[in-house]
Amino acid sequence: MRGLILRRIGIGLITVLAVSIIIFFGTKILPGDAAQIRLGQQATPENVAAFRERLGLDKPYWVQYLTWLGNFLRGDLGISLASDVPITNLIADRYKNTVIVSCLTALIGVPISLMLGIMAAMFPGSLYDRILTFISVTLVAAPEFFTATLLVLLFVFALDIGNAVVVGSTEGKGFFELISHFALPIATLSFVIASQLIRMSRAAVLNVMSSPYIEMAILKGVPRGRIIFRHALLNAIGPIVNVVALNLAYLVTGVIVVEVYFAYPGLATLIVQGVQSRDFVLIQGLGMIFCLTYVILMLIADIAAYASNPRLRHPK
Amino acid sequence: MAQTRNPGDRLPGDIVFETRDLRIGAIQHDGSEIRIVKGVDFKVRRGEVVALIGESGSGKTTISLSALGYTKPGLSFTGGEALLLGQDVTKMTTDELRPLRGISVAYLAQSAAATFNPSIRINEQVTEAPVLHGTKTQAEANAKALDLYRALELPDPDTIGERYPHQVSGGQLQRLMAAMALCGDPELLVLDEPTTALDVTTQIEVLKAFKQVIQEEGAAAIYVTHDLAVVAQIADRVIVLYNGEIKEAGPVHELITNPVHPYTRRLMAAIRPMPEAGQGEDSSDEHLRADPALAAKGIDAGYGVIGSNGKAAIPVLRDVDVAIERGKTVGIIGESGCGKSTLARVFAGLLPASDGEIHLDGERLSPDLAGRTREQLRKVQFVYQMADTALNPRQRIRDILGRPIDFYRTAEGMTRRQRVDQLLEMVELPLQFADRYPHELSGGQKQRVNLARALAANPEIVLCDEVTSALDTIVAANVIALLTRLQRETGVSFVFISHDLSTVSSFADEIVVLYAGMVAEQGPTDRVLSPPFHPYTRLLVSSVPEPRVGWLEEAAQTREAKAGASGSVQLTETGCPFFARCPVAIAGTCDVVDPPKLNDGAGHIIDCHRSLEELGG
Amino acid sequence: MSNETLTPGGAHPDMLGGMTDPEKTGHFVAPYDEGVSFDELPDSAPKERFRLSLTGWIGAIIVVFWLLVAVFGPFIAPWGENDLPFPDDYSEFQSPRAGAWLGTDVEDRDILSRIVFGAGRTIGIAFAATILAYVLGVVLGIGAAVSGPKVDMVMSRINDAFLSLPTIMLGLVVVAAVGSSIPVLICTAGLIYATVVFRLARALGMEIMVMDFVEAAKARGEGRWWIITREIWPNAAMPLITDFGLRLIYVILFISSLSFLGLGVQPPQADWGSMVRENLGALQYGESVFPVLAPALSIATLTVAINLVVDDVSAQAGGRLSKRL
């Protein structure tokens, strides 16, 4: 099992390398030249050439790539082409918003959804199950901005609580103040991941519930609660943790739309600005951060699946 | 609800379970009912084992589960009563049933591997029912479990409970399931085909253990099976079921010696007793004529990458020599994992041998498919065990049979349609089946189509891989009869692979006994089945249950002691692979040196270090 | 089958339990006719026919409605997509009124007409991209499944690297590199989702490849083309078609999200995702609901309706044991 995990981590590292290649060379196809973009149209060819040399753009691509990767690993993301500021400075003001919203969503959304999903699996076909299934089937297919619009309609227009835009600073706010500050983004993201989590955790438990050993437990007269929590959940943990990690990975992308919708500054809005201003140094740096988070969460999902398999935990 | 009892209270003859006009059906969405069990009455008394026997679809499992007040999802009780200790369990709610389940009545399923929760230690699962229901403390239950582990002759009884289900073998898990059922001291045990999935040498151990424990515990039992030979060993009374109805019921010896109902008679007829020595066809003189249709020499084969030493990563076969004569049937027999299917795949070119030669009609065959000509491919046809997966579900029978006709151009003057009709006639299927899809056919019918597809190529050799194993007894017997007839009519050679010695011996001309990838013994059927025996053949022959009362006890005394379920079947690098289980093994010789081939001069070869005289006794 | 009948209740209760009575042998035989054949019993009960549930029907009707709008919309739309219904009365975010039943947007255009034009564009792009994803994914996926392990490994590893990137991030990089236009959107979404289809088609192909009937075809000497077209494809088609609906949902959401971020369909062309973005101000400044709600609701009804149908079709039979707890 240790071998398997090391192998999986190895694959993860290779994936990160592959991702870095895709991002670096993907942004290299960009028409235009970094030095040109940075110096503007008026710059003389001599100036541009000198600047290219300073940025290392005259070197072969693979040298540029290795330099970039090395700098990234040291925490140096380069200098923004659009605003001439180090990327790390641009990020410093914004990463908090993104991290706070993602983490709070995970803390609130995940446990509630898992509970709802498992309860639905305990009473399949009941009214509760059918209503919950219908809601999650509906929400899972709806875009984030639809859910956000519904929430704005309800809270801002109908109930007149809060604001359709998130404004103000997070400085010095406590846990609950942060929740109310980001209430609508968190609620939107929670609804989106909840619909996935409910469906998938319900399916994971139901899948285990149709195994012969559950039938055996029924025939041994084991009470319902113990069947669910001892016999079924123990075998469903792997798939459920997997689902949770996959959904947290999804948050990484879901947060982009939500930040733009509620117009507060985060990493995601920064990357959209980067694309619009063709600031590919910014895209490279942020792209790597997002992809790295994503790859790590996928890695956790797989390791959780190994760890929950009794055949791997207790070899012969 | 929980009753306090002790075994002393149990009087033999009390009725433990009784059904009165029990009816079970599946209610469809449109409100109509499909009747599965159509009014069944029987009683099970204390100290008695009642066998429910029938083929698939007879309702035997459904009836047995009614003793636990349980129906499979989709089914429900539609009438009658099922009285467990006087209480009608068909009318009880789940909450009312719970205290009875695992305590008054316990269930043993067919596959222990699927029935044990993979994530929970064995002991917790074994002791769960009595502890949860409060009839035993955890300590008492542990003590009871330990007693049962010992009684069931499980290895390391003190520690086996600490393991997880995947850490013990299949035969052991089956016995552990018996311990799980018995731990709550149930009045009634329901056993659903508990030995069907086991190898024959393992089955006898498990049967013996079951029978002994049931007697010691003084419980009553319902034993569900399709195998009359097993019934004869374990049951006191037998109930024959067909299509949800009782056809015949009575004491076991009465039913076996004097079956009355035509259905029971057909069931009995479908069992082929092992031919006694000298009864098989004597074809020894023909073996001198050396003109085999297919001959394999020194075959090594396995799975995975072939290493620098020329061996596969997971070797399965080692140095196998087999010859198949024209128009004859060679039976290849062995337990699961012995490599018998692998050998057939090597013949067919599906798995290239890593070493050795195969000759077809004197021509050397390429080990892999790509190197064989279409004509060579045509001559060797393969028939799979599971017709369900062997027939493309999206093709009509006409296309399934038509393709080899077109591909090998075997219509010979007929139209393709005529040839398909002819093939359907050959396998005794109605001609209108040509336009059906495989899923519209029953299991036996699909297996006939599977066979017809092989025949469509006009082959010289048909490799039959466990073709009757998935079929019910009567259906299997019909398929065997069909094979015999086809061989007579077409002169084709069969390689018949099976784990079931009685089926093989009933129509094979020659038998090859495989053990852990090596040939243990081969020769004409009657000679292989009579002394001198290879020690493994002796074990195998003595393990096949005979449909007569008292066989189990005799066999347990006479068969090779301690050679049963213990050792695992593993291919060894050198020496005789049976060494670990062999009662007459010579340490330092058998495990190191490859056994010599002892030939009695009539084509009967035993691979053993002991002499023919020693093996004859 | 058999025309035998047992009298109700078996009628032989005494004979059945004869163990205590040595006088009787307890041997019961049901009445029978000689010559009745005991046919093999059917494998399983006949399957019930598939029927759409109520929600499935609702979903199907909504999907058909949107398809009709997408195809015939431009002919029935009250205004052109960039027409101003009230040129004399210019004002952004007008409330619904005669002539503009859903009000007007940020540039005073008729929202209803833009929704109708957007329907064709959104559905058309998504459909084209999904088809592209399927052609690429299925051809390569089944190709990988029938190729040797080495080819398969290389293809799968490359595919895995792309799969491990968040789709939106991939889309952003592509759009940053080559700019945004409808063909670029179709190709980007098609390529990104081809990775998912590849994995599915490969898995299906692998599953079918190891089935005995494929091996039987190989043993017969059939070529690779026959095996792919006659043995694998007919069996892979059904699950792939079911998945098509699901994939279409994801592609619609992906393209709408890109458009919403301003990186998809470019103004002044109407598209549901970009309409949400253009008019977001209406909501943020509390002016009007319709300019945002109408396009968002259009996407949601379409994707949810597709999902209702897909969910109905792929509803699993699992979980019936839970009722017996």
Image (cartoon, coloured by chain):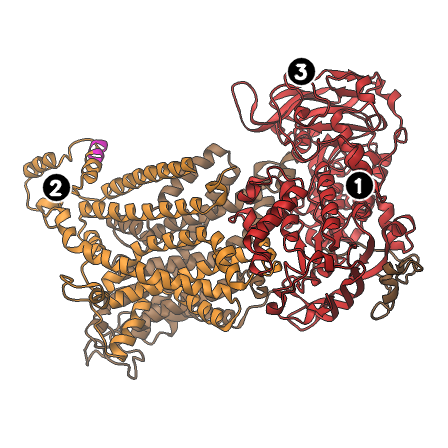
Q: Which mark is residue C88?
A: none
From the image, state whether disc 2 or disc 1 is nearer to you. Answer: 2
> Which colour denotes chain C?
brown
> Viewer-proximal residue, B364 or B605?
B605
Classify mark 2: helix, strand or loop: helix
B553 on left or right of B100: right
> The residue under label 2 is which amino acid type?
Ala
> Which colour denotes chain A?
orange
**Badge 2 vs badge 1, beta-carbon distance below 8 Å:** no
> The residue under label 3 is which amino acid type?
Thr
- The chain letter corresponding to red is B
Q: Chain of mark 2?
A: A
Across and down, in percent, residue C325 comes to 57, 64
Q: Which mark is residue B414?
A: 1
Q: Which mark is residue A35?
A: 2
Q: Quadrant of residue C90?
A: bottom left
Classify mark 3: helix, strand or loop: loop
Q: Are marks 1 and 3 on the same chain?
A: yes
Image point 37% across, 38% down: which residue? A11
Residue A64 counted in the magenta span: yes
